[in-house]
Amino acid sequence: MHKLGNTQTHPLLRMLLPIVAFVVAVLSGCHTTWSLSADETAIAKGVELPPPLSVAASMAVPPGHRIAYPAQRPSSPVGNVVRSGETTGGTVAAVVGADSGTASQAASPSPGREEGPSPPDLPDAHKPGLSLLVLPDAHKLVPPQPQAFPIHLPMALQLAGVRPLDIALATQRWQAAQAEWERARVLWLPTVFVGAEYFRHDGRIQDVAGHLFDTSKQSLMLGAAPGMVFALSDALYAPLAARQVAAALWQDMQTARNNAVLAVTEAYFAVQQARGEVLGLVDVLQRTEELVDRVDKMATAGLVPKLERNRVQVELSRRRQSLETAYERWQTASAELNRLLRLDPATVLVPLEPPHWRVELVELDRDVQELVALALQSRPELASQWAFVQAALARIRQERWRPLLPSILVRGSPANPGGTLAAGYFGGGLNGQLASFGWRNAIDVQLLWEFQNLGLGNHALVRQRQAEHEQAVIRFTQQLDLVTAEVTQAHAQAQRALRRSELAETELKLALATVQTSLEGMQQTRLIGGVSVLVIRPQEVVAALQQLEQAYRNYYGAVADSNRAQFRLYRALGQPAQLLTDRSPQAPGELPPSPG
């Protein structure tokens, strides 16, 4: 026998070391398949995602920070709608309502792992309709985080179909209902028991005539027996009710997908809105810094009192605080979107679309009544509630027929009164003998009509099922009213948000022009009583900058609200493919360029 020592390796350890190394390698390989890498394409099957949009000017990352580019994620083989269109500076393909299909889940990028593959070739530099977005020092536009992760709307929508836990939960509920339906369909098939029975008796026993005597006997049987007890009403109507329940939960699964897509898009445009506010605040901050430089020179030249220098310094501090707050909103919005997509919560998501990108899924000039009628045909919630109504009807028929249709009982009739087996190889004898083995078969079949509590119990069950049916009808009516209200509200929100975005665009143009004119006016003076006086005073420029900041917030907020309202309306309509507009995603018109 070998002994374990410091100078000699035990043969058992030498044999186990390759096995341990193999297990570690396998586990390491399994871990890498959960990362956003090129290996993931070997797991998921389907069509490749559309290429990402062109990179906006705000995509720059500070030195020392890394961007982990994902591999081309395969899309699901089942998707409701894929729509594409041209937007300024690149192509966008919006995958609407992507299904989970067979696509596997992809884990979030971790800051510690190596960078992913190189990003795909992108179009030329983005030339947004809002030329003011091309700002100097664009590296300031990404929050100071260890890692930024580029994402576009098609990728987010695809992940919305495979990552959220709500969809997984709804899918498992449907799977359970499907299994219950399969079980109800075979309710009339018997259960088969297979095994052995051994019986022994020692001592006094009583015969059929009532005589008592002592004996010792034993028996052994190897065989099988059927066991089946069911009501014909259950066999006829239980599968119908279970099928309707499974159909309802299937529609609930579609509802979960629609809700997940809506939640992801709202979170995505919250990220876009926060990023747009950062863009605007960076522009306002740069203009404020320019104002501070001019006021310093003017105060030195004696054109303005030193008090004006303090006033603009206070305004500069406020702008920097506002920018920090905007970064905070960007990071918190990214964390929420990461939660929905189950990505790394510490990663800052950087959308590849410009923040002023406008989505149009449904034409808003359609009549509301037409949209409501379409929603009543398309919403999975209504189909689900209607299936529950049909299931309740099947249960009413089941209870009405229960006392009229017999129950069927099939069981074995064993030689041993306490036994179960009916057919098989049987033998026995007195005392310790086991002999005279042979085949035997005894089956008992019964038809029984059941009147629960003299029929009063059956009547109560029918009334109970009728009440459940009425509840299902009421819930269906409530869902009808809810769908009608949601379509009307979403249509109004989409119309008003679109109008607000147009007004906010005009406001932003005017605010930019006001700031530009005010800064130019500070360089001009006029003589009043022999004293040179500025045409535009610094406090007027400060007021113009405050208006510009608010105009940026209003503009990017209105654009994000418009995009969110479009997806709310599309979800309220049940995501009908035939209603998608063939227009390209809209980008606003040209605004005055930013100086410098």
Image (tube, rainbow, N blue to C red):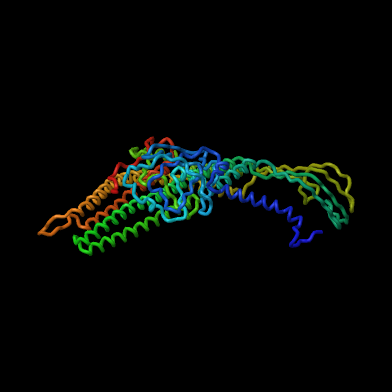
- Which residue is nearer to you in this view: 363 or 503? 503
In this view, the residue farthest toward the left is 529
How far from the left and from the top, in percent, is residue 264? 45, 48
How far from the left and from the top, in percent, is residue 273? 37, 50
In the rendered structure, the answer to whether residue 197 lies left or right of residue 128 reads right
Q: Is residue 454 visible?
A: no
How far from the left and from the top, in percent, is residue 465? 54, 47
In the rendered structure, the answer to whether residue 414 lies left or right of residue 518 reads right
- Which residue is nearer to you in this view: 173 or 232? 173
Please state, as top left, top right, bottom left or bottom right, where the N terminus lies in the image: bottom right
In this view, the residue farthest toward the front is 301
How far from the left and from the top, in percent, is residue 424? 80, 43
Tell me where residue 494 sits by quadrant.
top left
In the rendered structure, the answer to whether residue 493 lies left or right of residue 153 reads left
Tell me where residue 12 sits by quadrant.
bottom right
Q: Is residue 264 visible?
A: yes
Q: How many marks?
A: 0
- Which residue is nearer to you in this view: 392 or 522? 522
Residue at the location (25% across, 54% down)? 544
